[in-house]
Image (cartoon, rainbow, N blue to C red):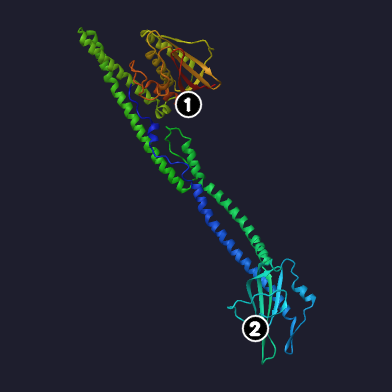
């Protein structure tokens, strides 16, 4: 069994492959474009909250200041004392807020309760005391009946006033407090009115960013489609219209690589073709000389040696012929050859008739199965290459079926779009595990015969160049079927 040559797919499999799950340029751009916007949104939300809180405090403090002034007017100094004129109507005005609880207290000296509905804490010690100027501060008071008190956070406005005679001035502290419920509600309302439009604006901006990323990366998607949609032998330059400079540079780099690979492949194929051409003439001369020597030699030992030399020359000549056929079947050579519409059934009959003498010479019964309809079966392609492929299939059957075997060739329509040529034999066949490998170059499933392991590889190359397929199938009780399927034309 000949050694297998490394296929192109195995060579490509040795290259490092980037996993698609490792990274995403679209995701990377989206993160780095959205993340700063999200940070700015959070910063804007924080600033908006502070602005809303400041404005809510100003509005709340203004109300507390007016209430404390109204309360101060209800306490009037008379002689050496104070006259409290605090009717029910004034009390209702101060406590008129339906959404919040208002607490008030008048004390003189500061801290000594004389009027109010709750004793309030004094201003902080570090708060400056300016007569007739309000001081605002936050405090915590205890509310509720004894035994069930609860702590309530309040905002307090305190005004210090002088009263009494100038020689003996005294101070009076007027305090009005309100829980922070209304202030926090106002803050939330301002924040919601600010944050909701801002959030909608950010969502719209993210949508525009996503659309911009998709549009910006579209040339990369086109480049991917241009590369992924190609066959393994398509090394033509990649063309991208109206692509950004970065993508054009990438496409240019890929085109440079494809051009280098194309030149390397062409040089290798040209070397094989030139070498095969150079070997044909000396091998043909060697065969002729060994045939003449065999006729003239009388020594049995010499005849045996000459027979082995002639057999080796025959196998070498067959190998050279197969290499030339393989070179003609390569994409560049096949594309340069003429394609035409022809009757595959007629071609199959003519080829089989030409190979009958060779089959009879080795004891093989070769024939055509004409049980189906006789109408033409039209295909389009290079008739010489298709003929070479079918010749290799029939030749393999003749070589390996064994003396006394039968080989049957059948050409028939296979569905509305395909035409199939089947070559059946009742020889030993090919073991099932090896059937997938017989189309590899230089692979031989047996050591019998004088093949070189290129026949079915050439068949596969030619058939795939014509957008067809070739397959093997084991027959029962023994034998092998090789089916070549090609697209049909009207």
Measured along the vertical axis of the image, is residue 72 above or below residue 479?
below
Badge number at residue 131 = 2
Q: In terms of sequence position, does the residue under pointer 2 or pointer 1 come before the other?
A: 2
Distance from Cα at disc 2 to Cα at disc 1? 102 Å
One can see residue 66 in this view? no
Is 193 above or below relative to 245?
below
Q: Mark 1: which secondary structure?
A: loop
Q: Quadrant of residue 9?
A: top left
Disc 2 versus disc 1: nearer the observer? 2
- Tag 2 secondary structure: loop
Q: Is residue 483 above or below residue 91?
A: above
Q: Quadrant of residue 389?
A: top left
The local crowd at label 1, few if under 14, some if 14 to 19, many if 20 or more residues have their Cα within 10 Å, is few
* Image coords of residue 165 (percent x, y): 69, 91
Residue at 28% of width from left, 22% of height from top? 279
Tag count: 2
Q: Which mark is residue 467?
A: 1
Q: Which residue, as the protein is rendered here, is positioned at the far front? A: 147
What percent of the width, then of the height, locates residue 384? 42, 20
Dividing the picture into quarters, in which one does residue 58 lie?
Answer: bottom right
Q: Is residue 270 visible?
A: yes
Pinpoint residue 68: horizontal percent, then vertical percent.
70, 77
Q: Which mark is residue 41?
A: none
Mark 2 residue crowding within 10 angstroms, few (<14) / some (14–19) / many (20+)? few
């Amino acid at each position: 069994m000949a050694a297998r040559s490394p296929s192109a797919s195995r060579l490509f499999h040795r290259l490092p492959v980037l996993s698609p799950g490792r990274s995403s340029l679209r995701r990377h751009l989206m993160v780095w474009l959205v993340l700063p916007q999200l940070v700015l949104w959070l910063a804007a939300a924080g600033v908006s909250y502070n602005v809303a809180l400041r404005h809510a405090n100003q509005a709340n403090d203004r109300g507390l200041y007016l209430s404390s002034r109204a309360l101060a007017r209800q306490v009037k100094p008379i002689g050496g004392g104070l006259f409290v004129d605090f009717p029910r109507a004034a009390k209702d005005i101060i406590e008129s807020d339906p959404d919040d609880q208002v607490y008030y207290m008048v004390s003189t000296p500061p801290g000594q309760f004389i009027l109010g509905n709750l004793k309030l804490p004094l201003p902080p010690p570090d708060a400056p005391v300016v007569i007739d100027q309000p001081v605002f501060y936050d405090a915590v008071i205890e509310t509720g009946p004894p035994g069930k008190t609860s702590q309530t956070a309040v905002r307090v406005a305190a005004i210090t006033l002088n009263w009494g005679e100038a020689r003996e001035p005294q101070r009076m502290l007027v305090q009005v407090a309100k829980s922070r419920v209304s202030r926090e509600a106002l803050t939330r309302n301002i924040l919601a009115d600010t944050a909701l439009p801002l959030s909608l604006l950010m969502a719209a901006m993210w949508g525009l960013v996503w659309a911009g990323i998709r549009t910006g990366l579209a040339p990369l998607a086109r480049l991917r489609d241009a590369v992924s949609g190609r066959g393994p032998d398509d090394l033509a330059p990649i063309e991208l219209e109206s692509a950004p400079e970065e993508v054009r540079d990438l496409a240019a780099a890929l085109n440079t690589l494809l051009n280098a690979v194309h030149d390397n492949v062409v040089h290798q194929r040209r070397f094989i073709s030139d070498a095969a051409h150079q070997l044909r003439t000396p091998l043909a001369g060697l065969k002729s000389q060994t045939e003449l020597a065999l006729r003239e030699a009388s020594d049995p030992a010499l005849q045996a040696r000459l027979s082995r030399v002639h057999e080796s020359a025959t196998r070498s000549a067959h190998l050279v012929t197969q290499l030339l056929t393989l070179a003609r079947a390569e994409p560049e050579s096949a594309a340069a050859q003429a394609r035409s519409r022809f009757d595959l059934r007629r071609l199959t009959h003519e080829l089989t008739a030409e190979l009958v003498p060779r089959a009879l010479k080795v004891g093989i019964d070769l024939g055509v199965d004409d049980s189906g309809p006789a109408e033409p079966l039209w295909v389009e392609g290079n008739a010489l290459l298709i003929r070479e492929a079918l010749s290799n299939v029939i030749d393999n059957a003749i070589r390996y079926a064994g003396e006394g075997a039968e080989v049957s060739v059948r050409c028939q329509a296979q569905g509305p779009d395909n035409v199939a040529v089947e070559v059946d034999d009742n020889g030993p066949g090919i073991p099932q595990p090896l059937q997938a490998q017989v189309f590899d170059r230089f692979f031989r499933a047996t050591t019998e015969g004088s093949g070189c392991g290129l026949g079915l590889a050439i068949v596969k190359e030619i058939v795939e160049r014509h957008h067809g397929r070739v397959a093997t199938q084991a027959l029962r009780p023994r034998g092998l079927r090789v089916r070549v399927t090609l697209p049909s034309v009207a």
